[in-house]
């Protein structure tokens, strides 16, 4: 298989896996994504979140408003630019995100257990560092 075909197959397969695993979520994908960014990257503005997610500012703001209403994020004035508002994950937001991630991992783990034999699991384990390296390469290019 040539590199272009391998790349396309990998993109399709990983995309399908991610979308399928996300069906276990109990919250809208945009809201889960905002919580995930705040958890991984720390406080940021709605504009920062929109840029990282590749969505419009309006889309990010809508998700943020929902999360604020649920007490899953909180705001504070930006320390360097008072016109901006920083968003922070609350303890309730961290808990909710952990529940979502746990649900995904449990469901995926059960599928791995049911569908893959011991040798196949080893292949999957061996592929993880390769996928992480590819991800890092894409982030830095």
Image (cartoon, rainbow, N blue to C red):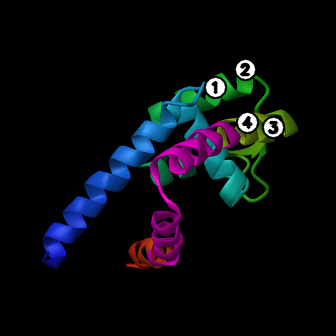
Q: Distance between the residues labelled 1 and 2?
A: 6 Å
Return the x and y of residue 109 as percentages of the image width and height.
Answer: 59, 48
Of marks 4 and 2, the one in the foreground: 4
Q: Nearer the viewer, residue 23 or 63?
A: 23
**Is residue 108 one of those drawn in magenta?**
yes
Q: Which of 72 and 84 is in front in this view?
A: 72
Task: State if disc 2 and disc 1 touch (CB < 8 Å).
Answer: yes
Q: Is residue 117 above or below residue 108?
A: below
SS majority, magenta: helix
Return the x and y of residue 104 as percentages of the image width and height.
Answer: 60, 40
Mark 1 Cα within 10 Å, few/some/many (few <14, many 20+)?
few
Label for residue 69? 2
**Tally of numbered tags:** 4
Q: How far apart are marks 3 and 1 (CA)?
A: 18 Å
Residue 56 in sight from this viewpoint: no
For residue 103, side relative to residue 71 (left or right): left
Q: In this view, does 39 lie above or below 97?
A: below
* Mark positioned earlier in the residue sequence (2 or 3): 2
Label for residue 95? 3
Dot 1 corresponds to which residue?
A: 65
Q: Give the range drawn in magenta.
A: 102-130
SS category of the residue bearing label 4: helix
The quadrant of the rendering that contains the C terminus is bottom left
Task: State if disc 4 and disc 3 touch (CB < 8 Å).
Answer: yes
* Mark positioned earlier in the residue sequence (4 or 1): 1
């Amino acid at each position: 298989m040539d590199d272009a075909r391998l790349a396309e197959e990998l993109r399709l397969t990983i995309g399908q896996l991610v979308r399928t695993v996300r069906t276990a979520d109990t919250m809208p994908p945009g809201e889960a994504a905002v919580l995930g960014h705040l958890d991984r990257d720390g406080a940021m503005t709605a504009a920062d979140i929109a840029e990282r997610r590749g969505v419009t500012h309006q889309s990010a703001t809508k998700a943020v408003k929902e999360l604020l209403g649920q007490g899953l994020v909180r705001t504070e004035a930006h320390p360097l630019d008072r016109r901006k508002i920083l968003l922070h994950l609350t303890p309730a937001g961290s808990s909710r995100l952990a529940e979502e991630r746990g649900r995904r991992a449990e469901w995926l783990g059960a599928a791995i257990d049911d569908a893959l034999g011991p040798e196949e699991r080893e292949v999957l384990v061996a592929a993880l560092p390769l996928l992480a390296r590819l991800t890092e390469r894409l982030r830095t290019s």
